[in-house]
Image: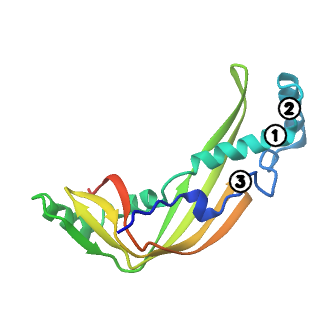
Amino acid sequence: MADTTLTLNEMLALPATGFPQQILTADVPDDELNTLKTRVSGALKGMPWGHLEETVCAKLSEQLNKDPLELISSAWEKYRVLADAAEQSKSGETVFVPLAEHSITSELHPYVEIQVGPQVVKKIEFDVSLTFQLKGLVLKIESEKIKSVEAGSCEGNGEIQVKNVSIWKHDFKPVNLPGRVNLGSGIAIH
């Protein structure tokens, strides 16, 4: 089976050069925005405001360059059927567990700080909410850990907000997991 690598960036179809709405100005009072622009332009002479926004977007994109199955599988670690499989796998046995269709909701709270010299002049906090609809998954359990997802599909949606202002929404169509998605050293089952 082929190994598949998938990232949140790919699922959310994040643009390469920024978001359609202004992330540095989302719900920021004019006086605060003018102060920020003055401080940044004074410290970073000649840097266009748009370049700073592109840099912030690039940093957010880096933080979302994660495997969504790590988020999903962490939600599974307390399921009773998986606890039974984990117990069975203690002896060195590999256990395959088929899962029923289900949804998982996850939230992330990445942030980007704009620093001028030693001082942070702006911290932009993002709220990322994701909903995954999972179908036909089979988990491979070894040594009390979820080691891989062997089959299935995933679809859902995601939204990125700054101070309750939506800056990105995307519905992702079914992504087939025809091969194996390895979870590295695995996700421990408690």
- Secondary structure beneath label 2: loop
If you read the primary sequence from the N terminus, does the residue marked by circle 1 or circle 3 appear first? Answer: 3
Q: Residue at position x 69%, y 19% from top?
A: 118
Q: Residue at position x 46%, y 76% from top?
A: 153
If you read the primary sequence from the N terminus, does the residue marked by circle 2 or circle 3 appear first? Answer: 3
> What's under tag 3, amino acid-wise?
Ala
The quadrant of the image that shows the N terminus is: bottom left
CB contact under 8 Å: marks 1 and 3: no
For this view, does 155 lie left or right of residue 100? right
Q: Position of residue 59 (x, y in %)?
A: 65, 42
| Residue at the extreme left of the image, as rendered | 91
Q: Position of residue 24 (x, y in %)?
A: 79, 44
The quadrant of the image that shows the C terminus is: bottom left
Rounded to the nearest angstrom, the CA distance separating label 1 from label 3 is 13 Å
> What's under tag 2, amino acid-wise?
Met
Q: Up-down: is 14 above or below 98?
A: above
Q: Residues within 10 Å of mark 3 (few under 14, many from 20)?
A: few
Rounded to the nearest angstrom, the CA distance separating label 2 from label 1 is 7 Å
Q: Residue at position x 19%, y 67% from top?
A: 84
Residue bearing the label numbered 1: 51
> What's under tag 1, amino acid-wise?
His
Residue bearing the label numbered 2: 47
| Residue at the extreme top of the image, as rendered | 118
Residue bearing the label numbered 3: 16
- Secondary structure beneath label 1: helix
Q: Up-down: is 177 above or below 25?
A: below
CB contact under 8 Å: marks 2 and 1: yes
Q: Position of residue 166 (x, y in %)?
A: 73, 60
